[in-house]
Image (cartoon, helix red, strand yellow):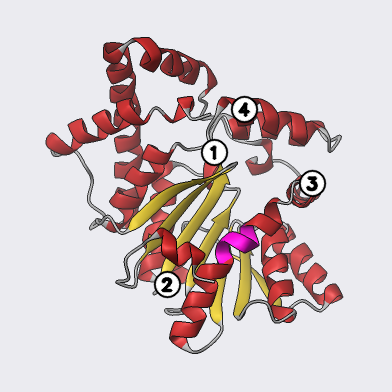
Amino acid sequence: MSMLQQKTAAYEAIDTLRREGRFPSCNVDPGQLEKATDGFMADMRRLQSEAAWKLGGLYLLPELIQSVLRTDAGELMDDPSLPAGQKLRMTRALGRQSGMLQLTESFVDLLSPIITELSERNGRDTRVLELAAGAGSLSLALGRAAMDGQLACRVTGTDIVEAYTLAAQQDAMQEGIPAEFRTLDACRMDTLEQGSADLVVIAQSLHHFSPGQLALMIHGAKEAGASAFIGLDGYRSLLLAAGVPLVAAMQGIWEFALDGLTSARKFYTEPELDAVAEIATAGRNHLVLTRWPLTLLFVRFDGIRATEASLEYA
């Protein structure tokens, strides 16, 4: 299951770059942070490949598979020329797929402990901000949980595509769900009001962004005064590389099925997310965990140690 994670070769590459003084600092302007992180990841992947070839045997086979699978191609959903109606159709298909696979329910379960911890510590509802929310299936699910009294939170879902946020807001109003939606560039959180979010979340979308853009999100969440950042995405593996496009094809939308194939080839490995989080925060107060079929990135900014206990608080 974990052969594509390439942890031994990956951490050898990270250690080499660290020893050579080539591990970037977050203490730069956003443009430099993005460029430095993307450059580091390119170097890391190159050195990882070299390390795998030197290690040989069982380390080399995954690297050969990686060389075939890995892609930087963009999803059709992210194509600016694609009509908004088609984009909305595809993101709604993703929401249906997540519901069918009970992923949305799993996301709520994974987020509930930290939401409860922050609410009890702050003595008020936890302000949850979702980035790249698409048609809002997760934000709406969190809003339903708040409405039913299961969670003490106020939810704001955001996306750069206005058609998504308008549709999600309409869904929330029709169901009476206490969730708000607004248009926001996930990489430009400097436009947020300071202290407007306690927990910043991004689910099923990490692979849509470059390493530098992920670093901007994490750094932006910290600068906006959030207590924590959680990223959830597919676990990079051969099983999901085959399974994601097959499940996506069940929606009967060829563009969505093609995006499923591209997405599965772009999921980040645990060492890659580990490095991005350290670059973005200039620290090690984060965890990268496997919650099959998901990878979970948990970063804390509030001085409390990031531990698995925080994710089991409730």
Instruction: Name the element at disc 1.
Output: loop
**Amino acid tagged 1:** Tyr
Name the N-terminal-most of marks 3 and 4.
3
Around disc 1, counting alpha carbons within 10 Å, would you say few (fewer than 14), some (14 to 19), or many (20 or more)?
Answer: many
Residue toward you, 122 or 185? 122
Of the image marks 4 and 2, the number of the one nearer the N terminus: 2
Dot 2 crowding, Cα within 10 Å, few <14, some 14–19, many 20+:
many
Of labels 1 and 3, earlier in sequence is 3
Residue 110 is covered by the magenta coloring: yes
**Marks 3 and 2 close (CB-CB < 8 Å):** no
Q: Earlier in the sequence, mark 2 or mark 1?
A: 2
Mark pair 2, 1: CA separation: 26 Å
Q: Which residues are magenta?
A: 107-111
Mark 4: few/some/many CA within 10 Å (<14, 14-19, 20+): few
**Residue 99 location (% of width, % of height):** 77, 52
Please, what is the three-letter code of the amino acid marked with disc 3?
A: Ala
Give the distance between the C-alpha atoms of the residues marked 4 and 2, in whole angstroms.
35 Å
Q: Amino acid at mark 4?
A: Leu
Place of residue 175 in the rendered image (x, y in percent of width and height, measured from the top left): 84, 74
Residue sitting nearer the eye, 213 or 79: 213
Location of residue 48 in the rendering, given as x and y in whole percent from the top left corner: 32, 24
Q: Residue at x 42, y 18 (%)?
A: 63
Q: Which residue is mark 4?
A: 239
